[in-house]
Amino acid sequence: MAEEERTTEQHFARKRFGQNFLSDHNIIRKIIDAIRPAADDRMVEIGPGLGAMTEPLMARLDHLHVVEIDRDLIARLKTAHSPDKLTIHEGDALKFDFGSLVADGAPLRVVGNLPYNISTPILFHLADYAEQVKDMTFMLQKEVVMRMVGSPGTEEYGRLSVMLQYRFNMFRMFDVPPGAFRPAPKVMSSIVRMVPKPRAECTATDEALLGKIVTAAFGQRRKTLRNTLREFLDESGFAALGIDPGLRGERLSMEAFVGIANYVAARPA
Ligand code: SAM
């Protein structure tokens, strides 16, 4: 696709903002039904674009928040909707403080047909708000969704799977073909629902350390844990944890990674 492609009389889709607008009304209805908005939900949509999901969401909600980066699209939204029904947060969702929407303690529902060029960083940014969130429903590249829900031992399983499965139960709901968008992306998309796990289920005492261990384990996928985790564990550590150091990171469950992080955190320096 060229940098800009005309999608309506007035708007050109901007590649740098990952703009592929939903145009298939059956798919839009299916996504809204999957979200199941209730009138009093505290909901935020990331990247409302030309409003394909925004308008049907607003029809079911008392109020909706949106976060949009493209000034032209913001201007269109402002003209079309009253601030009583729609609060427009102008700027980059990667820097947006989602916690500011739930200062009164009401849990947040997050939805969006996410710009594919920032899908991984936005998922990591949102993971920080897991405790304030009720659920999140996103459209993403199918390949990314397969990595999010990937199981140990599969090709898709990696850092994204472990770090998101640590915080969320995730469900791949259905796929959406390229023809449902204008302009059509080159790849298949999927809808994924993410529901935060109860905190006590499996907790790392030092989450930054968990992140470092998981990054190290998947940094060189073909190497064994003995090599990739050398900085964190020696042979006696692997033995104490009952983990074979000859395995690769892709064989370890999220719970096993949390076990390693907690063992390393508790070990005397
Ligand atoms: N929701 C619309 C739809 O389904 O047709 C648009 C989806 S389009 C894939 C992604 C939207 O996210 C665009 O409106 C784009 O301008 C916006 N966007 C891109 N990067 C963004 C960012 N960093 N922060 C907020 N919005 C962003």
Image: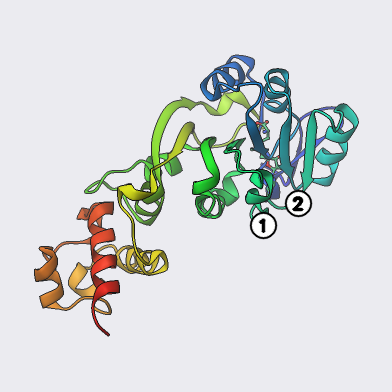
The quarter holding residue 138 reads top right
- Image quadrant occupied by the N terminus: top right
Question: Can I make out residue 268 in this image?
Answer: yes
Query: Would you say the residues marked 1 and 2 are in contact, meaning their CB atoms lie under 8 Å apart?
Result: yes
- From the image, tell me which residue sits under label 1: 95
Q: Nearer the viewer, residue 101 or 16?
A: 101
Residue 125 rendering spot, x and y as whole percentages = 55, 54
Q: Amino acid at mark 2?
A: Gly
The quarter holding residue 35 reads top right
- From the image, tell me which residue sits under label 2: 91
Residue at image x 24%, y 52%?
253
Residue at image x 23%, y 69%?
263
Question: Can I make out residue 229 in this image?
Answer: no
**Beta carbon at label 2 within 8 Å of ligand 1:** yes
Specify whether 64 is left or right of 34: right
Specify whether 219 is left or right of 34: left
Residue 95 rendering spot, x and y as whole percentages = 67, 57
The quarter holding residue 148 reads top left
Specify whether 106 is left or right of 245: right
Residue at image x 34%, y 49%?
200
Q: Nearer the viewer, residue 139 or 65?
A: 65
